[in-house]
Image (tube, rainbow, N blue to C red):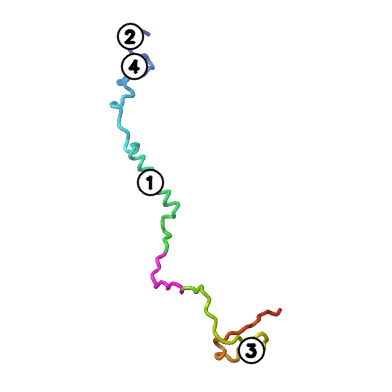
Amino acid sequence: MADDGQQRQGDNRGGDRRANDRRRLERRAPPPPWRRPAAFVAYGAVGVLMLVFVLRGCGGHDTPVPTGPIAPAPPAIATTPSTPHQGPVEQALRTADFERLILEGERARGRIVQAQLYCDA
């Protein structure tokens, strides 16, 4: 075949109307809306939100807010020892002395008693 500018049979390169302008941007169509940079940013934001919702369980477990009265603060604990009572110290080293104090009841209140405690098997 002669090379006189005619198109050869089976060769589609000769009839292209863009010729050497294939990569020039002004001749190309704009990308569709789902392939634009703003769409890719939106895909990333939606992906992050979905990940947060999956990891947090969609926020259904909120901490309850108390609605009733709030308990008062506990009283202060005294760190200094109280002053010892003035008066005689009673000995209650035997079982009979201990039982006597129990039988006296309210009259034995406020007395200083020295006792030795032990446990039997």
Q: Which residue is mark 4?
A: 14
- What span is in magenta? 64-75
Quarter-wise, where is residue 22 in the image? top left
Q: CA distance from mark 2 to mark 4?
A: 12 Å
Q: Is residue 107 left or right of residue 41?
A: right
Dot 3 and dot 4 residues touching (CB under 8 Å):
no
Q: Can you tell which of label 4 and label 1 is closer to the viewer?
A: 1
Q: Nearer the viewer, residue 4 or 97?
A: 97
First of labels 3, 4 by sequence position = 4
Q: CA distance from mark 2 to mark 3?
A: 136 Å
| Residue type at the position of mark 3 | Glu
First of labels 2, 3 by sequence position = 2
Q: Which residue is mark 1?
A: 46
Q: Which residue is mark 3?
A: 99
| Residue type at the position of mark 1 | Val
Establish if 92 lies above or below 2: below
> Residue 91 in the image: x percent, y percent?
64, 86
Crowd band around label 3 with a 10 angstrom C-alpha radius: few (<14), some (14–19), many (20+) = few
Element at badge 3? helix
**Residue at the image position 35 percent from the left and 36 percent from the top:** 35
